Image (spheres, helix red, strand yellow):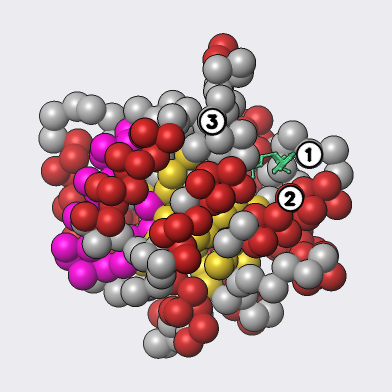
């Protein structure tokens, strides 16, 4: 089923996984994780795509597995590291596995290979234009990424919004946001996007911050602001792993409850291949909302 059709009917709940490193047993572990997450009845599960294109086959394989267990997959494709032949190969594997939704991305430019990167697909919109025939024939729905705090390479939010509108014009049916910890950035993005003529649903992406070591990594990766009260708590309890885990999960649920109360069209959870994170958040939300999703 197309994700845009789901969004037209209900608020979605979805999770994101990434292809594991190529070590024996990892793929089995991920499959077991996916079978557990399936029990939560998510509307879809997305699978990331390596920035260097190296997990291409695994992304397609995992997306096809998700389809076989009865959940709708959303396969990411990053155009940056790919040739048109790579993209053709990926799409044909995805279509063969019954995948109907892709998240079209550029990918993060690796520092050492910047010149070579994006040789064929400079931006997410180039990838969507290249794949336009699949959209026109109704075989694929397109999602795209957006950035509540602005993309790290953009000078202003207005510049980013202009490119977000181009993504919609190139066929994006919905957007999923970069992670954020201050919901005000999401609300600002939605209101500015509507003013810029972007009408597609904007699904907030939530990554529970359950490990203090992630704070620096996340800030460096995407510049996400961490509210002072949350940051203070993380610092105060940094030596108590279990307590931090609970604080991170509760904060994510607080964010989600606020987002639902204010009308977010869906919730996408970056679950870091950890079924227990998905289950803990899901059960907390069920306690609050019952069968809301
Ligand atoms: P683009 O849309 O190409 O944007 C990149 C920059 O260029 C932005 O600053 C934008 O404003 C600007 N821009 C866009 N179009 C134009 C244009 N026509 N002319 C000039 N400037 C333009 N990375 C992975 O490697 N694998 C993944 O699976 C993955 N999944 C992700 C999922 C989500 C929901 C999100 C939010 C990000 C994901 N990323 C992933 C990270 C993403 O690849 C990076 O954020 C990347 O730097 C930008 O990708 P994009 O598709 O937004 O690129």
* Ligand 1: quadrant of the figure: top right
Marks 1/2: CA–CA distance: 10 Å
User: Which residue is tagged 2?
Assistant: 163
Q: For ligand 1, tell me if the residue under mark 2 lies within 8 Å.
A: yes
* Rendered view: 26 above or below 118: below
Quarter of image, res 73 = bottom left
Q: Residues within 10 Å of mark 1 (few under 14, many from 20)?
A: few
Q: For ligand 1, tell me if the residue under mark 1 lies within 8 Å.
A: yes
> Mark 3 or mark 2: which comes first in sequence?
3
Asked if one can make out residue 208 in the rendered structure from this viewpoint, the answer is: no
Q: Residues within 10 Å of mark 2 (few under 14, many from 20)?
A: some
Residues rendered magenta in the picture: 55-75
Q: Is 58 within the magenta?
A: yes
* Rendered view: 197 above or below 23: below
Q: Relative to the observer, which residue lies in front, 193 or 130?
A: 130
Secondary structure beneath label 2: helix
User: Which residue is tagged 3?
Assistant: 120
Query: Looking at the rendered structure, which numbered label has been put on residue 154?
Result: 1
Relative to 221, is 82 on the left or the right? left
Residue 246, horizontal then vertical, whole percent: 47, 55
């Amino acid at each position: 089923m197309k994700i845009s059709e789901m969004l037209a009917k209900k608020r979605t709940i979805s999770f994101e996984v990434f292809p594991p490193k190529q070590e024996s047993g990892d793929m089995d572990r991920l499959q077991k994780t996916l079978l557990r997450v399936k029990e939560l009845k998510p509307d879809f599960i997305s699978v990331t795509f390596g920035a260097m294109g190296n997990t291409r086959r695994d992304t397609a394989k995992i997306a096809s597995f998700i389809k076989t267990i009865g959940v709708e997959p959303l396969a990411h494709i990053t155009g940056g590291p790919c040739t048109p032949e790579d993209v053709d190969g990926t799409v044909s594997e995805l279509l063969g596995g019954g995948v109907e939704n892709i998240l079209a991305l550029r990918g993060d430019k690796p520092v050492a290979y910047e010149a070579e990167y994006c040789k064929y697909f400079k931006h997410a919109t180039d990838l969507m234009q290249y794949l336009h025939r699949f959209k026109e024939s109704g075989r694929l729905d397109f999602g795209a990424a957006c950035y509540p705090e602005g993309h790290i390479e953009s000078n202003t939010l207005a510049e980013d919004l202009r490119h977000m509108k181009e993504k919609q014009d190139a066929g994006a049916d919905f957007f999923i946001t970069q992670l954020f910890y201050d919901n005000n950035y999401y609300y600002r993005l939605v209101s500015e996007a509507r003013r810029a003529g972007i009408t597609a649903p904007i699904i907030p992406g939530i990554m529970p911050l359950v490990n203090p070591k992630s704070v620096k990594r996340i800030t460096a990766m995407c510049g996400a602001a961490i509210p002072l009260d949350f940051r203070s708590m993380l610092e105060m309890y940094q030596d108590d792993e279990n307590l931090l885990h609970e604080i991170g999960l509760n904060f994510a649920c607080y964010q989600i409850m606020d987002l639902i109360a204010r009308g977010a069209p869906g919730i996408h959870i970056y679950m870091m291949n950890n079924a227990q994170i998905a289950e803990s958040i899901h059960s907390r939300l069920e306690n609050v909302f019952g069968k809301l999703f």
